[in-house]
Image (spheres, coloured by chain):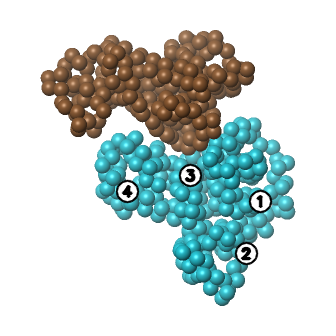
Chain colours: A brown, B cyan
């Protein structure tokens, strides 16, 4: 299937906050109550449509344990978006956000869009972090914020799609999509320069003759 | 049929010479079972003999003998960091979630005790994800809690290269560097392709080492790998990696991105 852009995402956050469950809910629309823990990294992808543009999301789901930080850091390179996840029922996962953010700022490109996610909103009776605290942290650090439930799927679509919308806005505002470190690849459908570079060409799709130029600049 | 031939071979061997409790030569840590026994172990240990052979060949039996009295039990009185305890607690249920032989209340409780005992025994390493799969797998084979601990100690402390499960997994990172170095001489085409596509195997397949294949291969294959590891040492791990990559060489050469390579390797086994 052809797409206008490919965005690389990374999901980060403490161990057991539900990173893999969010990904599974988003890519497969299902919830696994008991899920294998992630050793190293897992991967998923899905197409989304933003203002009639097909966008392919390539999502790296990383291990949360501290030991894996050095491996995780290499995934920041070339990521356009990050989902920084904490668990609203475990206060310490919220308190570790600063150290995750520091890692992200240090190893990612400065244009990376970061979405802060308070997961497990369905377990309200065990809540240890209020919504206001999440909002406050997001405001302070210039992040987009949502509370989600990977279990009920509440806000899961929004988390991934709103991040893509923000990235699209950045492209419209002139973010250089030909710079690989920005985590964006131009697909065939966009007809932009670089359309047949990077091995993402779909041989089945007809080439858009003369569709270059303006198309790539108007993502959304 | 293969299994029955295997059992017969082992029976013939044991009639000539009873299996000793200790097959390893701990003083040198280099020489391990050789000759007929090495060949037998390479071809696979029969199910019913596996616990005895693993305990003997890994060095667990003699390690236990040389340890202070009731070492495993007495470890319990030592403190363990809260962070380690919390991490272990989160991971118990997420280990082989579909395996009904391990994933019961009893199984999880045993794994908790073994992992915490290891963290107390080796506080510098503590607990690193991956050890949970190794521990659960050993328990499924050995069915003896204390021997799971001792075999794990031998595997992680003596047989494995140092630092594989260190708090920054530096041992794992360096072993994958060695693996890429081996690829350069053994499978240069593949290594050149990995370099061209910026594929670093530690980024996509660190679990091969952290879990010792117990999470990546079908159980009997993973057990066969450990049969050979206990008999011949850590080099077997490299051989298995090289074989897994070689088997997929033509497909791997077609993958030009990290996600493609990762999916291919995950779906092949």
In space, the residues marked 2 and 4 are separated at their CA atoms by 39 Å
In space, the residues marked 3 and 2 are separated at their CA atoms by 29 Å
Which residue is disc 4 drawn over? B248
In space, the residues marked 1 and 4 are separated at their CA atoms by 39 Å
Which residue is disc 2 drawn over? B21
**Mark in front: 1 vs 3:** 3
Q: Are marks 1 and 4 in contact (CB under 8 Å)?
A: no
Q: For the residues tagged 1 and 4, is the chain the same?
A: yes
Q: For the residues tagged 2 and 1, is the chain the same?
A: yes
Query: Label 3: chain?
Result: B
Residue at (37% x, 18% y) in the render: A50
- In this rendering, position of residue A117 left or right of residue A60: right
**Mark in front: 2 vs 4:** 4
Q: Secondary structure at mark 4?
A: loop
**Mark in front: 3 vs 2:** 3
Residue at (54% x, 32% y) in the render: A30
| Earlier sequence position, callout 1 versus callout 4 | 1
Residue at (52% x, 23% y) in the render: A156
Question: Looking at this view, is A19 or B102 the one in front?
Answer: B102
Quarter of the image where one finds residue B186: bottom left
Question: Looking at this view, is A28 or B119 the one in front?
Answer: A28
Above or below residue A7? Residue A137 is above
* Residue farthest to the left, as pictured: A210
Q: For mark 2, does the 10 Å Cα neighbourhood hold few (<14), some (14 to 19), or many (20 or more) residues? A: some
Which residue is disc 1 drawn over? B146
Which residue is disc 3 drawn over? B215
């Amino acid at each position: 299937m052809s797409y206008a852009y490919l965005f690389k995402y990374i999901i980060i956050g403490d161990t057991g906050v539900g990173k893999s469950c969010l990904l599974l809910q988003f890519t497969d629309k299902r919830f696994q109550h008991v899920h294998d823990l992630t050793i190293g990294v897992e991967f998923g992808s899905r197409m989304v449509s933003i203002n009639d543009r097909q966008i392919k999301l390539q999502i790296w789901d990383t291990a949360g344990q501290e030991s894996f930080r050095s491996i995780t850091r290499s995934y920041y390179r070339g990521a356009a978006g990050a989902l920084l996840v904490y668990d609203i029922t475990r206060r310490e996962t919220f308190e570790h956000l600063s150290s995750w953010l520091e890692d992200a700022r240090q190893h990612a490109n400065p244009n990376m869009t970061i979405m802060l996610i308070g997961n497990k909103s369905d377990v309200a009776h065990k809540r240890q972090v209020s919504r206001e605290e999440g909002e406050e942290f997001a405001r302070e650090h210039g992040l987009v914020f949502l509370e989600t439930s990977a279990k009920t799927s509440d806000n899961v679509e929004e988390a991934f799609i709103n991040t893509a919308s923000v990235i699209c806005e950045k492209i419209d505002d002139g973010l250089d999509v030909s710079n690989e470190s920005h985590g964006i690849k131009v697909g065939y459908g966009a007809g932009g320069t670089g359309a047949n570079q990077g091995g993402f060409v779909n041989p089945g799709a007809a080439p858009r003759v003369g569709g270059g130029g303006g198309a790539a600049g108007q993502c959304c | 049929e293969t299994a029955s031939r295997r059992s017969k071979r082992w029976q013939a061997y044991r009639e000539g010479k009873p299996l000793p409790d200790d097959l390893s030569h701990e003083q040198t840590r280099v020489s391990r079972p050789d000759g007929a026994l090495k060949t037998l172990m390479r071809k696979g240990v029969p199910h019913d003999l596996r616990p005895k052979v693993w305990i003997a060949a890994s060095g667990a039996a003699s390690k236990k003998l040389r340890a202070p009295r009731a070492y495993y039990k007495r470890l319990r009185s030592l403190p363990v960091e809260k962070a380690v305890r919390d991490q272990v607690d989160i991971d118990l249920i997420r280990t082989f979630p579909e395996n009904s032989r391990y994933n019961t209340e009893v199984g999880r409780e045993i794994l908790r005790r073994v992992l915490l005992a290891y963290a107390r025994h080796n506080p510098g390493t503590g607990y690193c994800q991956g050890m949970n799969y190794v521990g659960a797998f050993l328990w499924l084979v050995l069915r003896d809690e204390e021997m799971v601990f001792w075999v794990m100690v031998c595997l992680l402390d003596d047989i494995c290269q140092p630092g594989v499960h260190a708090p920054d997994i530096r041992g794992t990172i360096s072993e994958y560097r060695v693996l890429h170095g081996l690829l350069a001489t053994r499978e240069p085409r593949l290594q050149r392709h990995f370099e061209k596509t910026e594929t670093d195997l530690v980024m996509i397949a660190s679990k091969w080492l952290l879990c010792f294949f117990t999470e990546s291969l079908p159980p009997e294959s993973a057990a066969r790998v450990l049969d050979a590891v206990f008999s011949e040492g850590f080099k077997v791990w490299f051989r298995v990696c090289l074989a897994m990559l070689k088997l997929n060489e033509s497909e791997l050469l077609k993958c030009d991105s990290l996600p493609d390579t990762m999916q291919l390797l995950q779906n092949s086994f």
